[in-house]
Image (cartoon, helix red, strand yellow):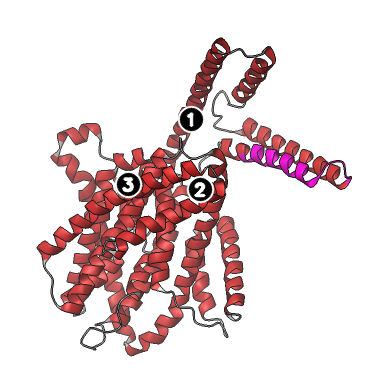
Amino acid sequence: MEAKFPIFLILLAVLAGTAYLSRRIHIAHAILALLAGIALAFVPGMPALELPPDLVLLGVLPPLIYSASVAMSWREFRASLRLITLLAIGCVIFTACMVATATHFLIGLPWNVGFLLGAIVAPPDVVAPLAVARKLGLPRRMLVVLEGEGLANDATTLILYRFAVVAITTGAFSLPVAAGTFTAILTAELAFGLLIGWISLRLRHYARDPQVEITLSLLTPYVAYLIPEHFGGSGIIATVVCGLYISWNGPLLISAATRLQGIFFWDLVIYMIEGMLFLLTGFQMRLLIEKSKAFAVNEILLATAVVAIIIVIARFAWVYPAIYLPRFLQKSLRKSDPAPSWRWTFVIAFTGVRGAVSLAAALALPFALPSGEGFPSRDLILFVTFNVILITLVGFGLGLPMVVKMLGLGNEGRKEHIAEHEAELEARREALAAALASLDAMTDDRELSDEVVKLLRTRHEVRSGQIPGQIDPDEDNSQLGTELVYELIAAERKFIHMQLRDGKITDESRRRIERDLDLEEAGLINREYRRMPL
């Protein structure tokens, strides 16, 4: 334990350093963390750190999926549900079959082993590409499709993965039985996810204590995930549905104090989980190289090249028909939801980065069959999976900004961003108008003193004055005003600190004043309308 603790501190330091470097050089943190993990693995004296598959599949995946689902809009998810389903289910199955076919005829893998490898490398990751895509100012719907696919495709993968492992270990497989089981799992997890979301929100509403509510929010994804997983499901669909239910129904049931504290808590949790996950994924390079000595280098390179090329071809071959064919066949769909441009479709197809879930699935493969023989091609599957993750994460992750810039999609995202904030300003004005009407009704129905009414109207006027009349595209004036307010807040902080040192106020008073200043500063950050990046 004592030897491992300094390593943990080193990992934390590297995590912070890569995060800082990521912001400075505008490269996704996941890419830098993976490369840093690979470099650390070969530092003399550094012990080997194996990534336990259960840590990823049972410990890390539930909160990652849940937090992304809560942050997603159910309305936007539902609007793109058809395409998300075609990608998360159809594209994963199609890719797995394509990999199985290619590896069988080009490398000589048995069909069942090739399908297992295909199932493992089929799902694109959601973390790294979205971190890049958000900074590029891509259209909102594209982000929703990519995130929705990334959340749901792991469920398809894990179910196919289990079918393939059972087929290899037992030698038996029935397509009708597998299809029926797949449908039953999806249906049951949909209902279970809704149930857990409903129970979680009610418990948190009745608790009325931020610490208790945040603790319940941390337990929720594990309950939604682990129970279906224990009974042979994926757990992922239930967790996604639970998160979407809470996202849609939570605003009126979760208190303001819980929201404020929960945002910071979950931001830190996800930051730590994602960073450590990619760091430890990089560490696996050393272990895999040691195991790869049983294979010829050309065999490993050939298998990696074949699988990497096939998954790219399969994604492009599936994405274009998935987007355009339904509209070609359905006239009503063409009118209600016109086809996006080929540039939009190209970026969706290009964003096929693989991540840690694929590696965890490969690491979770059994070492031996029930007969005592070694699991066929286990080490080859491990090495190919890691290489595919490295190639797609670094190659496509670094290439995505150039592709977006060449296609000019950042401009579309910028226009959408401005329109979104104009709608937000209008919503703020209408909300304040509704509040003013409510205040007028209170004044008529209740015996309120003139002082109370004046205080409430002053509050309303202050809040109304904080909303800009329009969004300034150049932002020079608004940016200058924001910077001046920051300076005024800093001057208040300095004065309060001097009052504390002089003994004129207590620490408790200082904390209460400081909290008000913190909330005001957080409000400034929330109201900033910065230009979208190129």
SS of the residue under disc 1: helix
- Dot 3 corresponds to which residue? 194
Magenta stretch: dominant secondary structure: helix
Considering the numbered disc 2 on the image, is that residue within a helix, a strand or a loop?
helix
473 or 380: nearer the viewer: 380
The Cα–Cα distance between marks 2 and 3, rounded to whole angstroms, is 18 Å
- Span colored in magenta: 502-522
Q: Can residue 30 be seen?
A: yes
Image coordinates of residue 175 in percent, x first then y, are 11, 64
In this view, the mark in front (1 or 2):
2
Q: Quadrant of residue 293?
A: bottom left
The amino acid type of the residue labelled 2 equals Glu
Question: Mark 3: which secondary structure?
Answer: helix
Circle 1 sits on which residue? 424
Q: Is residue 425 left or right of residue 57?
A: right
Tag 1–tag 2 contact (CB < 8 Å): no
Q: Is residue 60 left or right of residue 429?
A: left
- The residue pinned by badge 2 equals 213
Q: Position of residue 196 (x, y in %)?
A: 36, 49
Residue 502 spot, x, y in % from top left = 89, 45
Which circle's residue, 3 or 1, is located before the other in the chain?
Answer: 3
Cα distance between the residues tagged 3 and 1: 29 Å
Residue 513 painted magenta = yes
